[in-house]
């Protein structure tokens, strides 16, 4: 059975920026992570220049996003990491670009988005529960291609309109949530 327009429209996520657009750079300036500068200085230009990630670079990006996944990520062979990331960075098909990264052990949607964010030539946001809260989600949604692509397009439009880089927007969204998202009883989100 083919989806109808109405059912397809229900699956398209709605995003609403909680931060005034003219405040993005202010919130981004409050974000602090010293390891990110090393990624941008070393890994980003190397991966973009050669069109794929080396295994050690892949492991560093995975560790930056979520250290818990490291044991699984370490099971990926060098040649497999190269070919998967070469395929991802080389295709113009957006769905293939993200989904191929999911075949790597230990890589989920958020980690795949980190790889694209730092290494692909095109601007991609990082899929993160904090950032998603800052665009209107009260709880973490189920990660799907529709969510990721809708989020990417939404933030690219903001980037185009404001002149802010995707990295600046990502920092702002994360920081805004960190400082403004209400906590549940017991202090845990």
Image (cartoon, rainbow, N blue to C red):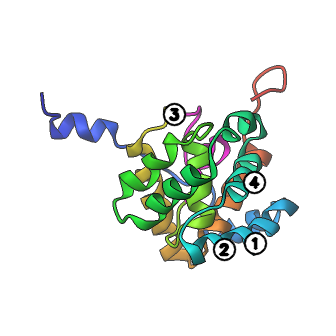
Question: What is the distance, in whole Å, between disc 4 and disc 1 at their CAs?
Answer: 11 Å
Q: Is residue 129 magenta?
A: yes
Q: Earlier in the sequence, mark 2 or mark 3?
A: 2
Q: Which residues are magenta?
A: 125-140
Query: Quadrant of residue 52 in the image?
Result: bottom right
- Residue 53, position as x, y percentages in the image: 61, 62
Tell me which label, 4 or 1, sits earlier in the chain. Answer: 1
Q: Which residue is mark 4?
A: 60
Q: Which residue is mark 3?
A: 141
Q: Is residue 37 left or right of residue 54?
A: right
The Cα atoms of the two marked residues, 2 and 3, are separated by 33 Å
Is residue 133 placed above or below 68 in the rendered structure?
Answer: below
Q: Quadrant of the N terminus?
A: top left
Residue at the image point whose x is 60% and y is 56% from the top: 115
In the rendered structure, the answer to whether residue 142 lies left or right of residue 186 reads left
State yes or no: discs 1 and 2 in contact (Cβ < 8 Å): yes
Task: Judge from the rendering whether residue 8 lies leftward or rightward of residue 125; answer left or right.
Answer: left
How far apart are labels 2 and 4 at the CA level?
13 Å
Q: Are marks 3 and 4 in contact (CB under 8 Å)?
A: no
Q: Do labels 4 and 1 touch, CB within 8 Å?
A: no
- Asked if labels 3 and 2 touch by Cβ distance under 8 angstroms, the answer is no
In this rendering, the label closer to the viewer, 3 or 4: 4
Overall secondary structure of the magenta section: loop
Instruction: Choose mark 2 or mark 3, whichever is in front.
Output: 2
Residue 28, by quadrant, is: bottom right
As measured in the structure, the alpha-carbon distance from the residue carrying label 3 to the one carrying label 1 is 33 Å
Q: Earlier in the sequence, mark 2 or mark 4?
A: 2
**Which quadrant of the figure contains the C terminus?**
top right
Residue at 48% from the left image edge and 64% from the top image edge: 89
Question: In this figure, which residue is indicated by the disc labeled 1?
Answer: 42
Answer with mark 3 or mark 1, whichever residue precedes in sequence.
1
Secondary element under disc 2, as helix, strand or loop, is: helix
């Amino acid at each position: 059975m083919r989806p109808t327009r109405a059912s397809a429209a229900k699956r398209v996520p709605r995003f609403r920026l909680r931060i005034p657009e003219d405040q993005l750079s202010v919130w981004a300036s409050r974000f602090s992570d010293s390891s990110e500068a090393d990624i941008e200085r070393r890994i980003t230009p190397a991966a973009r220049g050669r069109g794929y990630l080396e295994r050690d670079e892949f492991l560093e990006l995975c560790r930056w996003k979520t250290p818990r996944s490291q044991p699984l990520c370490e099971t990926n062979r060098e040649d497999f990491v190269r070919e998967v990331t070469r395929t991802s960075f080389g295709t113009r098909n957006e769905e293939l670009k993200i989904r191929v990264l999911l075949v790597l052990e230990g890589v989920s949607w958020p980690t795949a988005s980190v790889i694209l964010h730092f290494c692909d030539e095109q601007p991609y946001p990082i899929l993160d529960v904090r950032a998603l809260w800052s665009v209107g989600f009260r709880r973490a949604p189920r990660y799907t291609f529709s969510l990721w692509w809708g989020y990417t397009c939404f933030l690219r439009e903001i980037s185009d309109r404001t002149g802010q880089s995707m990295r600046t927007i990502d920092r702002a969204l994360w920081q805004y949530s960190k400082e403004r998202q209400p906590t549940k009883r017991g202090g845990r989100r």
